[in-house]
Image (spheres, helix red, strand yellow):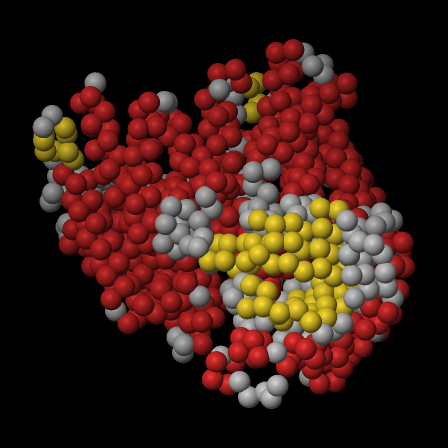
């Protein structure tokens, strides 16, 4: 039994690291411009499909398509911000809520139109198989993805804390007006943040594609779970999203293990509700 | 516009007469079906509007109340032979209680946070029903075929009685919405929508009034749920508890104009024929074109006319100051 | 003058973590007085307002209004008891008309819309906004928004009106108008407590002035006494600039 438990914990961690990466992008967007990106999960889906098609059509292993996914999603994020999201920033709250829903529905169904709803899989990635470590089965793709997620998260963290632009992003997140007064072009920061947020799920998508089923509606659940993670970690907090992602991964797996697997997502949603009821600023938020 | 100008009364009257005559003239059952779905969504849009458009609580989880209404009346009918009309009222009350249970802890949530909480709520309820053996879990409930007639809230031969029933529900909802919006409660809702602080300093018990809004909204939405169950005679979590239904409800209200009584009706009148039509003519191919158009429309409206159709009219009517 | 003060603040202390925003504040306000609360930025004036009006309870101390202990009352209950307030950043209901805004306030004391309209119009006439009654909240100038906010507060039929920096951001003409309005409100029997930075207004309207600095009350007296006080000047300008003669 303990072995099984350990296995579940390891699984939870592996999922958790991916969740972290996905959530960091969402919390960045949310923190900087106060917009909930309901299309976040669909950006992930685009990342996964990009990786899939590069693999299927050109034999490019997902690990090597990461730069392409990153660049593509970055540009996509900026374009969507420029042409759609920026225009509702000054509009009513309802419009801000609904617009990314619209983008989400559009993107996921565009994928259905072009690529059919069928489930796809990358069958032979470079790094595949399973290690057995101390009686625990460690899926290599998932392990590599987790490492990738940690590296990427660290990179984002360093970018925000150490570079000039990164600090401008943090400043905008903390106090928009003050940032404006300091001469920061907050509109460019918005754009950049949206782009980075999208790029991060592009990377996550590339990693996920090595072991997860790829299909147009895959973004749905990931997107919703990301909200719980962002809330738990604290809206706008990168470190918070990272830690919360791991926690949620653990809760989901262990929850499914101790209770019914079909309840695992409900438990994750309960986390969101409980967090905003009891500690609205999340674990590490301000 | 508290005193409706007589011009509006007359046009509303004409519209009503046309709607009443419609199914007698148009006998194609598909068109009758589209109208029925239109009315049903209009009811839910009006219900949403009371808590969303007026009180500022943008719920993306209304489908939970729809499902609760449908399941309550259906379960009572199947297990205890409770008359569906009574089941309708009980379903509304159950939905109201659930609304209080979820609304109270969420009293301080606004904007995005409330929206996501409502999605979380909807998904949790769906998961519960998906796993609850008592109400059929994933297989859902099949309603018994009772004798056709108003007493049993079931009509087998024709859609026309369903049409008039749901139209009556819509009229009831509109009256409720109108009464709320022109009463003290309506003003208080709008103050709450502006901000909790400004509401509090005017002596408004924000928690209490928010709960009023959610409960009224939940009751009316649950009514639509019972209607649907009696119309289709089969319900399962995948048909009465889906997030896209909640999103559709929000869209209808936004398109038509949140915060106005007739807004959701206009929005439903535009969106439902499009979504039903594209689903039938384009959707069955599985290409997702219908939803593509839908997503595009939503994005367009949010960006260029977030106040909806009604917003267009009121701008024209007021002119410049 | 009645036996009991209109407002009694006793030992009110409010801290946020280690920061004491209000430290043992003690004062009272008699009926129909206009009292100004002044002090440099960060002195704790708005915190005090929030404690008194029920936005958060003080950690220690009591607030009594017309003899009733309202220390832990919720904000809406405080309003029902008869204290109305405005905010530093003016808050009106943007997609209602001026009339509807004031009606919302009036609806606290009546239920019928017709009555609310009548009451609101009376208040608007008094406040000089009746001509703009059909303007939307968003269409007003800052000065008019402030007037509207005051009108909304008046419509709730308070016995004590608390204004948070009502004079900020006004032109000289608008300032004169606001000063007259407050004077007229007091003449009608209202007790008024204001937080203010605009000294010209403070001097003109106040019966008494209370000075806060760094969370503590450092002085209380007539406007003249306060303005000449060394301690008050030091608080505002720092030690170096003690330029006023005794």
Q: Quadrant of residue B99?
A: top right
| Residue B178 appears in the rendering | no
Q: Is residue A264 left or right of residue A11?
A: right
Residue occupying the point 72% across, 25% down: B89
Whether residue C179 is visible: yes
Up-down: is B200 above or below A195? above
- Residue that appears at 74% across and 85% down: C173
x then y, percent, for residue C212:
59, 67
In which quadrant of the rendered image does the C terminus of chain B lie? bottom right
At x 22%, y 58%, the residue is A155
Where in the figure is residue B138, as x and y percent of width and height? 46, 22
Is residue A90 toward the left or the right of residue C184 in the image?
A: left
Q: Is residue B152 left or right of residue C55?
A: right
Q: Position of residue C193 (x, y in %)?
A: 72, 65
Left or right placement of residue C124 versus residue A267 in this view: right
Q: Nearer the viewer, residue B319 or A2?
A: A2
Q: Residue furthest front?
A: C246
- The number of numbered discs placed on residues in the rendered structure image is 0
Residue B243, how many percent across, how many down? 50, 39
| Residue positioned 29% across, 58% down in the render | A199
Q: Nearer the viewer, residue B208 or B25?
A: B208
Image quarter where the N terminus of chain B lies is: bottom right
Viewer-proximal residue, B225 or C233?
A: C233
Q: Is residue A93 above or below residue A121?
A: below
């Amino acid at each position: 039994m303990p072995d099984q438990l350990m296995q579940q914990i390891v699984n939870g961690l592996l999922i958790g690291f991916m969740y972290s990466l996905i959530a960091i992008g969402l919390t960045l967007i949310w923190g900087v411009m106060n917009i909930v990106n309901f299309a976040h999960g669909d950006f992930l889906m685009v990342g996964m499909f990009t990786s899939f098609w590069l693999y299927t059509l050109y034999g490019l292993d997902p690990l090597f398509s990461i730069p392409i996914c990153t660049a593509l999603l970055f540009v996509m994020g900026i374009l969507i911000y420029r042409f759609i999201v920026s225009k509702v920033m000054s509009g009513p709250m309802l419009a801000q809520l609904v617009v990314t829903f619209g983008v989400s529905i559009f993107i996921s169904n565009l994928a259905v139109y072009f690529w059919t709803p069928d489930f796809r899989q990358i069958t032979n990635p470079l790094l595949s198989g399973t290690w057995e470590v101390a009686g625990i089965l460690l899926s290599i793709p998932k392990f590599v993805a987790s490492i990738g997620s940690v590296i990427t998260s660290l990179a984002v963290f360093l970018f925000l804390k150490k570079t000039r632009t990164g600090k401008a992003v943090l400043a905008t997140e903390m106090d928009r007006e003050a940032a404006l007064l300091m001469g920061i072009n907050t509109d460019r920061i918005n754009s950049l943040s949206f782009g980075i947020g999208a790029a991060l799920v592009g990377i996550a998508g590339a990693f996920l594609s090595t072991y997860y089923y790829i299909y147009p509606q895959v973004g749905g659940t990931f997107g919703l779970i990301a909200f719980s993670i962002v809330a738990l970690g604290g809206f706008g907090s990168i470190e918070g999203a990272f830690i919360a992602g791991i926690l949620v991964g653990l809760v989901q797996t262990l929850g499914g293990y101790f209770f019914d697997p079909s309840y695992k997502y409900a438990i994750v949603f309960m986390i969101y509700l409980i967090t905003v009821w009891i500690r609205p600023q999340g674990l590490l938020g301000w | 516009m508290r005193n409706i100008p007589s011009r509006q009364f007359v046009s509303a009257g004409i519209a009503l007469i046309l709607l009443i005559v419609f199914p007698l003239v148009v006998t194609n059952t598909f068109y009758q079906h589209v109208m029925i779905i239109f009315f049903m969504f209009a009811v839910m849009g009006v219900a949403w509007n009371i808590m969303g458009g007026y009180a500022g609580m943008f719920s993306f989880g209304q489908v939970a109340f729809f499902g609760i209404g449908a399941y309550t009346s259906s379960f009572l009918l199947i297990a205890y032979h409770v008359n569906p009309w009574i089941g309708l009222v009980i379903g509304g009350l159950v939905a109201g209680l659930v609304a209080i249970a979820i609304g109270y802890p969420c009293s301080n949530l606004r904007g995005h946070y409330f929206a996501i909480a409502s999605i979380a709520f909807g998904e949790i309820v769906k998961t519960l029903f998906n796993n609850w053996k008592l109400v059929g879990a994933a297989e859902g409930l099949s309603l018994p075929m009772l004798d056709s007639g108003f007493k049993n809230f079931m009509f087998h031969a024709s859609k026309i009685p369903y049409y008039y029933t749901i139209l009556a529900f819509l009229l009831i909802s509109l009256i409720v919405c109108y009464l709320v919006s022109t009463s003290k409660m309506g003003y208080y809702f709008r103050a709450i929508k502006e901000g909790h602080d400004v509401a509090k300093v005017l002596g408004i018990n924000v928690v209490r009034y928010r709960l009023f809004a959610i409960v009224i909204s939940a009751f009316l939405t649950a009514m639509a749920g019972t209607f649907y169950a009696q119309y289709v005679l089969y319900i399962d979590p995948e048909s009465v508890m889906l997030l896209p239904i909640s999103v559709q409800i929000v869209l209808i209200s936004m398109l038509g104009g949140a915060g106005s009584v007739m807004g959701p009706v206009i929005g439903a009148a535009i969106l439902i024929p499009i979504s039903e039509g594209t689903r039938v003519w384009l959707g069955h191919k599985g290409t997702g074109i219908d939803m593509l158009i839908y997503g595009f429309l939503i994005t367009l409206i949010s960006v260029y006319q977030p106040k909806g159709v009604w917003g267009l009219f009121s701008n024209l009517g007021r002119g410049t100051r | 003058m009645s036996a009991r003060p209109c407002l009694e603040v006793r030992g009110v202390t409010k801290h946020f973590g280690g920061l004491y925003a209000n430290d043992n504040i003690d004062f009272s306000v008699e009926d129909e007085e206009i009292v100004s609360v002044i002090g440099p930025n960060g002195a704790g004036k708005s915190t005090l307002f929030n404690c008194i009006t029920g936005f958060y309870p003080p950690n220690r101390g009591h607030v009594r209004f017309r003899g009733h202990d309202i220390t832990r009352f919720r904000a809406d209950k405080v309003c029902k008891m008869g204290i109305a307030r405005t905010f530093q950043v003016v808050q009106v209901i943007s997609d209602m008309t001026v009339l509807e805004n004031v009606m919302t306030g009036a609806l606290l004391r009546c239920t019928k819309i017709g009555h609310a309209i009548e009451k609101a119009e009376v208040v608007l006439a008094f406040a000089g906004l009746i001509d703009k009654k059909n303007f939307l909240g968003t269409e007003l100038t800052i000065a008019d928004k402030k007037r509207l906010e005051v009108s909304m507060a008046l419509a709730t039929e308070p016995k004590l009106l608390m204004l948070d920096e009502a004079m900020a951001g006004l032109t000289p003409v608008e300032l004169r108008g606001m000063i007259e309005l407050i004077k007229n409100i007091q003449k009608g029997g209202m007790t008024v407590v204001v937080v203010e930075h605009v000294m010209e207004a403070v001097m003109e309207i106040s019966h008494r002035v209370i000075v806060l600095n760094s969370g503590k009350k450092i002085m209380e007296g007539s406007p003249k006494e306060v303005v000449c006080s060394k301690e008050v000047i030091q608080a505002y300008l720092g030690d170096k600039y003690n330029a006023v003669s005794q």
